[in-house]
Amino acid sequence: MNPEKALGIITAGESLEVEFKSEKTKPLSDAELVESVVCLANRLGTRPGYLFIGVEDDGKISGSRPRHEGERTDPLRIQAMISNRTRPSLTVRVSEIGLSGLPVIITEIHPARSPVSTADGKFIRRALGGDGKPACIPYTFHEMQAFQADQGILDYSSLVLNGVAWEDLDPIEFERYRRMIRENRGRGDESLLSLSDLEVAKALGAVEANHEVRAIRVLGVLLFGREETLRRALPTQSLLKEKN
């Protein structure tokens, strides 16, 4: 990155794509650096993000400290360190440039296609904090699933819903499904007509079951859920259904 572009980004201030880290009072540890990279990798969008080491929160350039022997910083060693300390391994671009006569380390991070953690299993993501400012916050499991579903990596309909049981599915909806197959002969799987409700649900992948039902998937509630179950377990879908 050239100095002109770097200064332009710094002038615009911190954002969901840009984070500043100061080394004015103490060095930034490798662990802190890796966490910041993971945070910026776990964000929505397609544009690259940037971690600036040696810049204050207000955008003032205070300079980075040498990270390696001989009072120098080796960008390639930082790249290798980040790759070794992230799961899955992240490939980033690190450079050191002079700004206002001071060294600044810049790491360019592209958004990850799937959730990334530190090597010791810490998941954090870049988002707006409670004060409305960009921050690194915990990345919860259900948020990871939702992200993967949005990216097309995970089939949302196959997700298991907690707190939903077989009794929350409506036999009337199963019969309505069979009627739809009968009325559209040749365009539906007529072999389902002779199956029990449980066998139909298993054949469609609407439940997780062997001899007995262990869990209900999103698909099961969407196809066969009672109205109150849909409102409770999938409130957004329920609102869409009411509007339609």
Image (tube, rainbow, N blue to C red):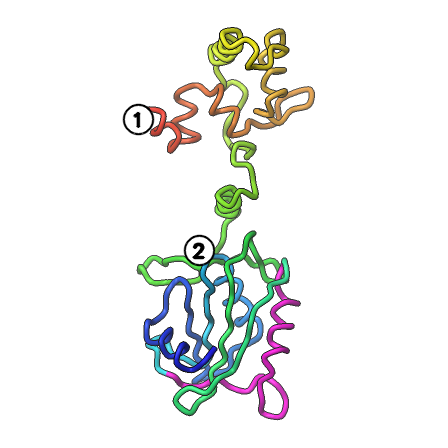
Residue under numbered circle 1:
243
Which percent across, then down, holds residue 193?
59, 8
- Residue shown at 53%/79% (left/top)? 95
Q: Does 239 sit left or right of 49 as displayed?
A: left
Verify CB contact (< 8 Å) between mark 2 and mark 1: no
Instruction: Kindly identify the amino acid type of the residue bearing the numbered disc 2.
Output: Gly
Residue 68 image-quadrant placement: bottom right
Choose between 123 and 183: the one closer to the eye.
Answer: 183
Farthest residue toward the front? 186
Q: Secondary structure at mark 1?
A: helix
Choose between 131 and 181: the one closer to the eye.
Answer: 181
Taking 62 as reference, is 239 above or below it?
above
Farthest residue toward the right? 211
Q: Residues within 10 Å of mark 1 (few under 14, many from 20)?
A: few
Residue under numbered circle 2:
45
Q: Does 169 sit left or right of 91 as displayed?
A: left
What is the magenta range? 61-87
- Residue shown at 36%/69% (left/top)? 14
- Residue shown at 40%/20% (left/top)? 227
Which percent across, then down, holds residue 139?
49, 53
Which percent across, then down, holds residue 16?
39, 62
Taking 161 as reference, is 116 above or below it?
below
Q: Secondary structure at mark 2?
A: loop
Mark closest to the chain's N terminus, 2 or 1 = 2
Which percent across, then down, holds residue 219?
52, 27
Q: CA distance from mark 2 to mark 1?
A: 30 Å
Instruction: Kindly identify the amino acid type of the residue bearing the numbered disc 1.
Output: Lys
Which of the two marks, 2 or 1, is nearer to us in this view?
Answer: 2
Choose between 214 and 102: the one closer to the eye.
Answer: 102
